[in-house]
Amino acid sequence: MAISKIKSRFCVSLLVFAIAISFAHIAEARMTIGDVEKVAQMPEGVFIEGPVFDKEGNLWFVEIGSGWISRITAQGNYEKFYNTGIQWGPNGMQMDRNGRLIICHRQLGIIALDPKTKKVTTIVKNYKGKKFNGPNDLVINSKGFVYFTDPWGTGVHNPTGGVYRVCLKTGKIIQLFNNLAFPNGINLSADEKILYIGECNKNRILKCDLTQDGLLAGSYVMTQFTGGNGPDGMSLDVEGNIYQAHFDSAGVYVVSPMGEVLDFISVPEGTGTTYAIFGGPENKTLYITESWKNIIYKVEVAYPGQPRYHETWK
């Protein structure tokens, strides 16, 4: 009994010490330069998400609730560009090297929108004939494979959320996970050996090792959060730090490649932070989408962002 109490007190002491060290580290490591500023607020926006820059400097994003694919031009003008015809349909979005917008759509699967022609092409709409739960977010690797999350309708009590990889050219699809509690944001390390997944309803980031062929080799919990709703969209900087938008927490966590929380970037208004991406002349400006008030923010950060697939133009 005495030994048990000693072990219990020792564990509690270690926990308190770890928490104290963690908060001390957050207080010392500031990853921003200057204040968070409002770029734009969409008065008619309905739950904005999926921001991505094209090479002309236009900032594209989705308005999930209304089905619009919209943009803020390089000149700062807000434009509704294309409507998918389905409310609460489009979600995460990236761009391929041909300049097409690759979109996660809850009802249509993975689709491609060509901004030049407004032609929409279906990449994949099901897995082995079974309809997806509802794709949410995606990342494209250097070989043209799309990794995407498929969470809708899943959660802690129904952990059947999926993660897939599909080839942009052929549409060939492989399932990597089918047992997650609302997998949400997703991204890759610069060497494409690690896949990061925000498992929203368990409030944590999963770190997944990939084989040389880009398939799953293993996974483990990298960072466990507390409070808020859970991790949403994410981006990485050139140091490998993750900028993890955390929904209903009014900000973005900065997490080291080892899973340590380095900083928290708060936004002035709204709690529904859905995504964080890099942009600006030196790729050192972090742009943050907030979905309850439909605001896009920006803040200068210490390190440039890791280039995305479409930003390594060939």
Image (cartoon, helix red, strand yellow):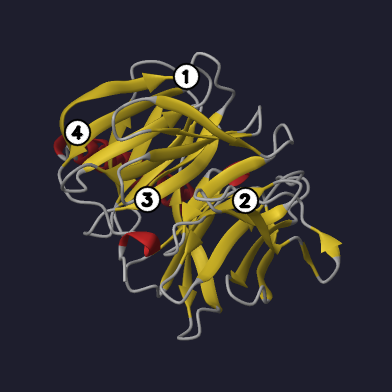
Residue 98 to residue 84: above or below: below
Q: Amino acid at mark 4?
A: Ala
Determine whether label 2 and label 3 are within 8 Å by CB. Answer: no
For residue 189, which numbered disc appears in the image? none
In which image quadrant can residue 67 be found? top right
* Nearer-the-camera pick, 232 or 91: 91
Q: Residues within 10 Å of mark 1 (few under 14, many from 20)?
A: some
Q: Amino acid at mark 1?
A: Met
Q: Earlier in the sequence, mark 1 or mark 2?
A: 1
Rendering coords of residue 143 (x, y %):
45, 77
Residue indicated by mark 3: 235
Local SS, label 3: strand
Q: Earlier in the sequence, mark 3 or mark 1?
A: 1
Residue 237 relative to residue 63: left or right: left
Local SS, label 1: loop
Q: Amino acid at mark 2?
A: Cys
Residue indicated by mark 1: 42
Rendering coords of residue 71 (x, y %):
44, 34
* Marks 4 and 3, how far apart at CA: 22 Å
* Marks 1 and 2, how far apart at CA: 22 Å
Local SS, label 4: helix
Residue indicated by mark 4: 27
Determine whether label 4 and label 3 are within 8 Å by CB. Answer: no
Outermost residue on the front side: it is: 117
* Marks 2 and 3, how far apart at CA: 17 Å
